[in-house]
């Protein structure tokens, strides 16, 4: 520590500043690299290698040996296998539909909650604190909680359905109810996240536009669609993008709640990839599933950004 | 008469009624989690369920620690989470300072690369990471999780910290330079105190992410002694019998520390969620 600081000790402040600037700048840039190197090397070592290796693995014949894997040859067979596989088709469709529905519902409910909180005169701080609890909750706990709620024998949802005369539906044992149960668990946990972001966006909107709209006799509904929503677009885009990313990687909830079932009804791409790799030890096809998922995620990101027409991080760089 | 109605109107209006339903929507499942943890193991299976535990029982709590190794999982989670968060903050602050304030070339490319890395789905990296850890012989250890958690949380922390560093006036650094302080000293004694809100934000996000992470913990820690809370809770019981009461007791204990942290630092969580570099 001391050696770094003494090596980069600046010249006395009284020294002439002219002509020293470039040297100083260069030294500062070098210092920048010294400072960021530990973090960048760390991140690169742990993430870049696996990313590259994952792609390589998906293009090779992988055999599992006693102490790891053996990769041989370049082949597209993992991808043809995956692309022709009906479970993959289902998992892809399921993951996309699941993502679209949950994110849409979360966006609508989240925005409504944000609009309510914005108008709330008392207790807003407490509401925010309450909203943060589901956000910070371990997903496995959330899954166990809803598993208990949807239990067919002693679950509270079963009791409610029975009490209003809807009988005893098998929530987690039949396809569509199982999917809906997963979605409810997901929506409960992540809607608060959307609400907080949207609320922060709402608070930052310039108030005089709304006053002007009111003076012009604009109704609440048209003000919302014509002014609030367009102004909120960047905020909504970020909320949607990060929710899409998360929902697309769906793993914890089905792993605990349904194990991907009944049958393959709740098998997401991540569950499929995990099972392929760590249950069936088919690492080649598993890597192909993982790589296609990663590509789809990046694609999804670009599409969300395009849809909402925003650019992230361009400002102030 | 008119007066009272007006008073009523002030309390019972659309906004407050909606807020009431929002509170119900969020609080009811939490209520269910907490009261179920106090039911007796037999009452857990009542149909229709008990809406209030009677008798009140602490059996689930003692069972979580005695029959299941929740104490071990809690300790493991705490060690892994604290170490990863500390590393992220140390590396992230220095790098965030450099990327925010020092004249480096290619900063934009670096920041975008970091952003892309931070959105990469875990499932895509899990197999090669598993192989790497196996070759280095660190599966079933604290490092098995501390290293990837640090690496995966650093990009977001660097973004947050860089944004805070950008906001610090340039004169502050020059004061340090005139006093003859070296660059690390300047970061330590002048920049760091001013970037403290950013550190809280990055810290609480990293803590939450590590505390809740499941896939890597599941894959890299196959031995019970090294499991963290999420995996430990998921493995409670047998395939035939799921001890929900014990699971919920453990869950309440797992939710409390992070709940307190998030409550104390809620200002920073919200500023982190809205700083433009959002992450769920």
Image (cartoon, coloured by chain):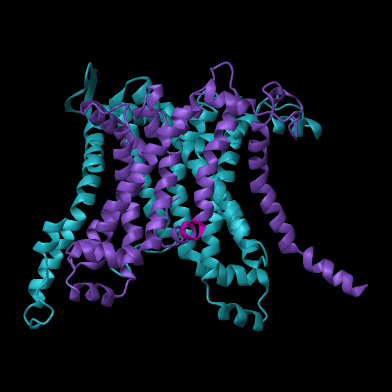
Identity of the residue drawn at 39% across and 24% down: B225
Could you tell me if residue A76 is visible in this image? no
Q: Position of residue A209 (x, y in %)?
A: 56, 79
Residue A176 position by quadrant: top right
Identity of the residue drawn at 78% across and 30% down: A162
Q: Position of residue B258 (x, y in %)?
A: 50, 45
**Chain A image colour:** cyan
Could you tell me if residue B74 is visible in this image? yes
Q: Position of residue A184 (x, y in %)?
A: 60, 40
Quadrant in which the C terminus of chain A appears: bottom left
- B130 lies left or right of B247: left
- A82 lies left or right of B133: right
Indicate whether residue B272 is drawn in magenta. no
Identity of the residue drawn at 55% across and 63% down: A199
**Rendered view: B163 above or below B51:** below
- Magenta stretch, overall SS: helix
Residue B45 position by quadrant: top right
Q: Position of residue B266 (x, y in %)?
A: 51, 57
**Rendered view: A126 above or below A72:** below
Identity of the residue drawn at 53% across and 76% down: A206
Indicate whether residue B266 is drawn in magenta. yes
- B263 lies left or right of B169: right
**Chain B image colour:** purple
Residue B183 position by quadrant: bottom left
Closer to us: A190 or A18: A18
Magenta segment? B265-269
Quadrant in which the N terminus of chain A appears: bottom left
Closer to us: A76 or B70: B70
């Amino acid at each position: 520590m001391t050696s770094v600081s003494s090596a980069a000790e600046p010249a006395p402040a009284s020294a002439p500043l002219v002509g020293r600037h470039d040297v100083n700048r260069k030294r500062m840039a070098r210092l920048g690299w010294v400072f960021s190197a530990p973090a960048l090397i760390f991140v690169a070592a742990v993430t870049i290698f696996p990313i590259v290796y994952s792609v390589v693995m998906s293009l090779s014949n992988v055999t599992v040996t006693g102490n790891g894997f053996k990769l041989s040859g370049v082949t597209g067979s993992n991808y043809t296998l995956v692309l022709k596989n009906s479970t993959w088709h289902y998992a892809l469709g399921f993951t996309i539909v699941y993502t679209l529905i949950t994110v849409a519902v979360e966006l609508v409910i989240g925005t409504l909650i944000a609009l309510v909180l914005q108008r709330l005169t008392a207790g807003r701080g407490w509401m925010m604190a309450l909203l943060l609890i589901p956000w910070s909750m371990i997903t496995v706990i959330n899954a166990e909680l809803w598993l208990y709620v949807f239990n067919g024998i002693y679950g509270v949802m079963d009791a409610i359905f029975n009490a209003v005369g809807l009988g005893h539906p098998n929530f987690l044992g039949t396809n569509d109810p199982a999917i809906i149960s997963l979605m409810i668990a997901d929506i409960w946990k992540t809607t608060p996240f959307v609400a907080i972001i949207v609320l922060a966006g709402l608070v930052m909107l310039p108030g005089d536009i709304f006053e002007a709209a009111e003076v012009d006799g604009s109704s609440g509904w048209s003000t919302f669609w014509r002014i609030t929503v367009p102004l909120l677009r960047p905020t909504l885009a970020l909320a949607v993008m990060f929710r899409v990313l998360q929902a697309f990687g769906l793993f914890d909830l089905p792993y605990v709640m349904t194990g991907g079932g009944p049958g393959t009804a709740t098998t997401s791409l991540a569950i499929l990839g995990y099972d392929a790799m760590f249950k069936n030890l088919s690492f080649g096809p598993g890597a192909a599933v993982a790589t296609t998922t990663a590509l789809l995620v990046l694609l999804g990101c670009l599409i969300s950004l395009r849809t909402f027409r925003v650019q992230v991080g361009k400002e102030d760089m | 008469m008119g007066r009272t109605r007006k008073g009523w109107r002030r309390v019972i209006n659309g906004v407050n009624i909606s807020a009431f339903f929002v509170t119900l929507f969020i609080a009811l499942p939490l209520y269910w989690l907490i009261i179920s943890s106090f039911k007796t193991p037999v009452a857990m299976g009542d149909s229709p369920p008990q809406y209030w535990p009677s008798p009140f029982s602490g059996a689930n709590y003692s069972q979580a620690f005695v029959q299941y190794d929740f104490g071990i999982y809690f300790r493991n989670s705490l060690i892994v989470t604290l170490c990863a968060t500390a590393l992220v903050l140390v590396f992230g602050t220095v790098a965030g300072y450099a990327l925010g304030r020092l004249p480096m070339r290619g900063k934009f490319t670096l920041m975008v690369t970091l952003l892309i890395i931070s959105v990469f789905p875990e499932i895509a990296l899990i197999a090669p990471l598993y192989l790497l850890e196996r070759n280095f012989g660190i599966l079933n250890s604290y490092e098995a999780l501390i290293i990837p958690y640090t690496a995966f949380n650093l990009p977001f922390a660097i973004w947050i910290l860089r944004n805070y560093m950008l906001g610090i006036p340039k004169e502050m650094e020059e004061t340090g330079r005139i006093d003859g302080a070296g660059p690390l000293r300047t970061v330590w004694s002048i920049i760091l105190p001013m970037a403290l809100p950013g550190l809280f934000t990055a810290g609480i996000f990293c803590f939450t992410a590590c505390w809740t992470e499941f896939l890597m913990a599941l894959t890299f820690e196959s031995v019970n002694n090294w499991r963290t809370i999420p995996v430990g809770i998921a493995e409670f019981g047998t395939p035939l019998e799921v001890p929900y009461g014990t699971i919920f007791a453990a869950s309440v204990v797992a939710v409390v520390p992070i709940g307190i942290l998030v409550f104390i630092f809620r200002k920073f969580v919200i500023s982190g969620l809205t700083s433009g570099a959002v992450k769920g």
